[in-house]
Image (cartoon, rainbow, N blue to C red):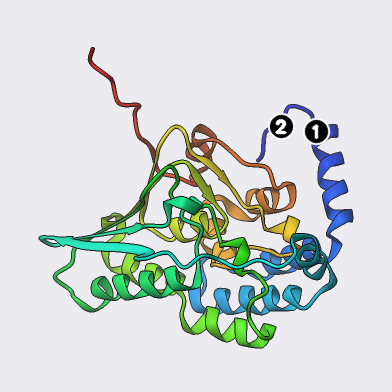
Amino acid sequence: MVTVESVEQALGQLTERCQRWPQAAAVCDDVLRSLDPAGSTRAGLITESLAYSTLQSGGEFARWLAERGPATAPLLPEPVQAHRDGNTLHVRFNRPQRHNAFSTDARGALLEALDVARLDPSVDEVVLGGNGRSFCSGGDLAEFGSFADPASAHVARTRHSPALVLDEVTARLGRGCRAEVHGQVLGSGLEMAAFCGWVSCDPDATIGLPELALGLIPGAGGTVSITRRIGRWRTAYLVLSGRTTDAATALAWGLVDEVRPVPVTVP
């Protein structure tokens, strides 16, 4: 169940957005209805990625690209930082200038860091976080549309998938694989965090799935990870409404597992 202040107003907003992005809304519905949350993660991610690639070749995404105009993502050094403290692996997004927007080079660095936990059984704890004011604000919009074709994008997503690795590590470690989120927790940032066995959230977090406004659906595993946590209907609401939610609501839904207390400043 989703609680709103006005059912009539909420339905009006949902209807308006579905009419503005009908292809993305329909594909979102198809993917969520076809997904078995208890089924294979890989199968779910392949379904999601094929649907995402379909939308990448559609008119709604083309319209967004035209409205955005030409863009180039800056190359920032060390997009992901990782260090080991005993048996604990700390992994942090490190593009604070862009609220840790998830880029191609960040994906490669994240996979390299997570491979340590995947391949080394002595690692018994993984902590995923972000430097700066946000955990991860989602995909770097300047990179959207940079693949030569949707088929190449699908192959890249499914053959180099942080979601699959996080799912594998969580299957081994359970709550020992945790995400500590704060600030903007949007799009792919939320989708990846939801694969972790435990998600700890700052009270200031802003949580949401904004992809529909690009003519897309979640493409970093969210139709699997978020649906497993909060079900199809709430996932559909987050996507179709585009609305963000706060930490308290995310906790009540099960999207996060803990809201960290605000530190007390002693004068």
Mark 1 belongs to which amino acid? Answer: Val
Q: At which x and y percent is residue 218? A: 62, 63
Q: At which x and y percent is residue 240? A: 74, 52
**Residue of label 1:** 7
Quadrant including the C terminus: top left
Would you call the spot at circle 2 few (<14 residues within 10 Å), some (14-19), or many (20 or more)?
few
Residue at the spot x=51%, y=58% of the render? 101
Q: At which x and y percent is residue 167? A: 40, 68
Would you call the spot at circle 1 few (<14 residues within 10 Å), some (14-19), or many (20 or more)?
few
Secondary structure under badge 1? Answer: helix
Q: Are marks 1 and 2 in contact (CB under 8 Å)?
A: yes
- Horizontal arrangement in the rendering, residue 173 relative to residue 150 (left or right): left
Mark 2 belongs to which amino acid? Answer: Val
- Toward the viewer: 66 or 51? 66
Q: Is residue 175 above or below residue 8?
A: below
Q: At which x and y percent is residue 241? A: 73, 46
Q: Is residue 82 above or below residue 181?
A: below
Secondary structure under badge 2? Answer: loop
**Residue of label 2:** 4
